[in-house]
Amino acid sequence: MDAVTNVPVPANEPVKTYAPGSGERAALEAKIKEIGGEQLDLTMTIGGESRLGGGAPVDVVEPHNHRHVLGQLKNATDDDVRAAVDAAREAAPAWRALSYDDRAAILLKAADLLSGPWRATLNAATVLGQSKSVQQAEIDSACELIDFWRFNVDFGRQVLTQQPTSSPGVWNQMEYRPLEGFVVAITPFNFSAIAGNLPTAPALMGNTVIWKPSPTQQVAAHFTMRILEEAGLPPGVINLVTGDGQAVSNVALPHPDLAGIHFTGSTGTFQHLWRTVGENIAGYRSYPRLVGETGGKDFVVAHPSADPAVLKTALVRGAFEYQGQKCSAASRAYVPRSLWGRIRDEFCDEVEALTMGNVAEDLSAFMGAVIDERAFAKHKAAIERAQAADSIKVLAGGGFDDSEGYFVRPTVLESADPTDEIFTTEYFGPILGVHVYDDANYDAMLDQMEGIAQYALTGAIIAQDRRAIAAAAERLRFAAGNFYINDKPTGAVVGQQPFGGARASGTNDKAGSIFNLIRWVNTRSIKETFAPPTDYRYPHMG
């Protein structure tokens, strides 16, 4: 088709309320009952064919009711991953030959399918498999993933329009080719939107992908793949492999055609991937692109001028929504003594009152369970350490129970020692450390907290004094890739707050922006001369 098209202008997907008696609530409840009543075969998808992996079986359970098995996957074997690599390589020529508009149309259709007939299904899968409240599921597996697919189409078009100038008699062009090889997308348990975005962003730009979701997110990943297939994704473009990822490390990472890794997960895992690439660097066809978003020890700094109600809300929502299992979650707070004395008791009462339970049965619950037994054990150990420490006060929470689900009560810890591990270690759970500083030591507190943790993902300043806001924004310039003023440090919206951090938090390539998509193209500069010279001599030669 000869046309310079305009892609549809994206707008953020409206968030549904799921109020009692609403149609969306009834549809979600029905899907929760349907999916929860099945035991799914959580298959791989390789070259368009669905089949179970060849390795050991893994039960996928509800975190809030861990005796209930939602489905079973099997770990991918080395042979399974070889088949996925072969399928990706085989599909690559036809996929990259397809026009950008045709590739974009698949994601736009997928977004419409998710906005409509698939919405309740993917939200129900996220509630059941990841123990998200209905609100947290809606903003994740529906709205954010829809936004990723729609906005990325617009961002990708912006990439293609970046063209050079041309002098008289010359036409200069910039071609945006896919990377030469395949991309490995490794996705986390905590966001279905991230799981859907990491494989599809490189695919939009013409790459073929091997996608390895987290086993604990596999139910939602299973349905995400079905949405993409219904939207018209050709076989072999995205190849989903299941399980622990060992075979991906064995086969895909050292493969000569590895062109990139798109990763969200722990800092330790990303460093392992980076080391593996480094160890194999001489064997690759090209230098693999590594894009990673990892951990955080995200902060809320309160200035003495902070509005107490704003601070309390930012801490409750920022620290305890989705059980603190967001890489952006507030896990350390710095509060002036003059303000802490006014809000401490009321804040702790609010934390104690937060409702927690089986989010698949009680859609009004604020919190569900943490994701699995390993996470539960980590949070339990952190709380028990704090309870035994003379320098730490447990002000709220401190309870845990894994008899039915992996439940950890939202916990507030106060310490006078700003170097304690509660201010430096990522727990990735509902544990908030609070350091109360003397008002006169505000500047010293900023200097200390800026570099005490290795991460630089998100942070917030709560203040009404504009000079204090401006000063904190400057002094904490490198302490967070996403910085919030008078708000919680979570909840980045695609198209509004591109997300990512630096230091040990990742490569800061900003998911949900043009900057991320640029990483998945390999540019070629083309110069055409219409009246080329026919004599090698220059005028100065006489």
Image (cartoon, grey):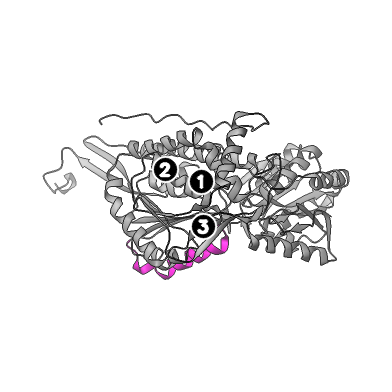
Dot 2 or dot 3: first in sequence order is 3
- Asked whether 476 or 530 is in front, the reply is 476
Contact between labelled residues 3 and 1, with CB atoms less than 8 Å apart: no
Write down the region rendered in magenta: 264-285
Count of marks placed on residues: 3
Going by the numbered disc 3, the residue's amino acid type is Gln
Tell me which secondary structure the magenta stretch mostly adopts. helix
Q: Amino acid at mark 1?
A: Ala
Q: Residue 8: percent from the left, percent from the top?
A: 42, 29
Give the label, 1 or 3, closer to the camera: 3
Which element is circle 3 on?
strand
**Tag of residue 228:** 2
Q: Helix, strand, or loop for circle 2?
A: helix
The label shown at residue 511 is 1
Q: Is residue 413 magenta?
A: no
| Residue 131 shows in the view | yes
Among the 4 quarters of the image, the one containing residue 68: bottom right
Question: Is residue 499 something that shows in the picture?
Answer: no
Name the residue that disc number 3 marks: 72
Amino acid type of the residue that numbered disc 2 sits on in the rendered structure:
Leu
Identify the disc placed on residue 457.
none
Q: Nearer the viewer, residue 131 or 482?
A: 131
Whichever of labels 1 and 2 marks the residue nearer the N terminus, that label is 2
Residue pushed farthest bottom?
Answer: 279
Q: Secondary structure at mark 1?
A: loop
Q: Residues within 10 Å of mark 3 (few under 14, many from 20)?
A: some
